[in-house]
Image (cartoon, helix red, strand yellow):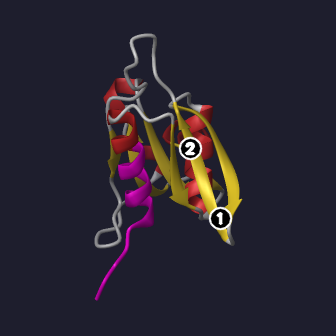
Amino acid sequence: MCMTDSLGDMLTRIRNGAKARFEKVDIPFSNMKANVARVLKEEGFIKNYKIVKDKGNTILRIYLKYDESSMSIFNSIKRISKPSRRFYVGHEDIPKVMRGLGIAVLSTSKGIMTGEEARKNAIGGELLCQVW
């Protein structure tokens, strides 16, 4: 039985691209990945993202962001909930990442959002990843 973790693959491509100081990384498209990219852009961890149609394939192109000294904006991007072990939290149990310096990304009944938004709206969900 082969389980693929497409979100884990996306996070790994972003992490590796940032370490190699790439300008952009291309990832096979899915709505969930596009929504995670939207949250990362809103929170300032990536420059931008774009959905590209290429020879019948749809690609999510993520433009990475660096500071003045060419260091990646984020220190770590970590997958929490995995296909082999899902991790769900109630709104009162959403962790503060690095004492508020990072973000938690959740998949909720109202869509993909940060832990802070989920806490404000009093909804829990699946804790997808943490970025700091």
On the image, numbered disc 2 is attached to which residue?
62
Which contiguous range is marked in magenta? 1-14
- Give how far across and how far down residue 126 sits, in percent: 45, 59
- Give how far across and how far down residue 27 sits, in percent: 51, 57
Residue 6 placement, left or right of 53: left
**Which mark identifies residue 119?**
none
Residue type pointed to by label 2: Ile
SS state under label 2: strand
- Which residue is farthest bottom? 1
Q: Residue at x 39, y 11 (%)?
A: 69
Q: CA distance from mark 2 to mark 1?
A: 13 Å
Q: Quadrant of the C terminus?
A: top left
Q: Nearer the viewer, residue 76 or 123?
A: 76
- Give how far across and how far down residue 46 sits, in percent: 54, 33
* Residue 66 drawn above or below residue 83: above
Residue type pointed to by label 1: Thr
* Residue 107 drawn above or below residue 97: below
On the image, numbered disc 1 is attached to which residue?
58
Q: Quadrant of residue 6?
A: bottom left
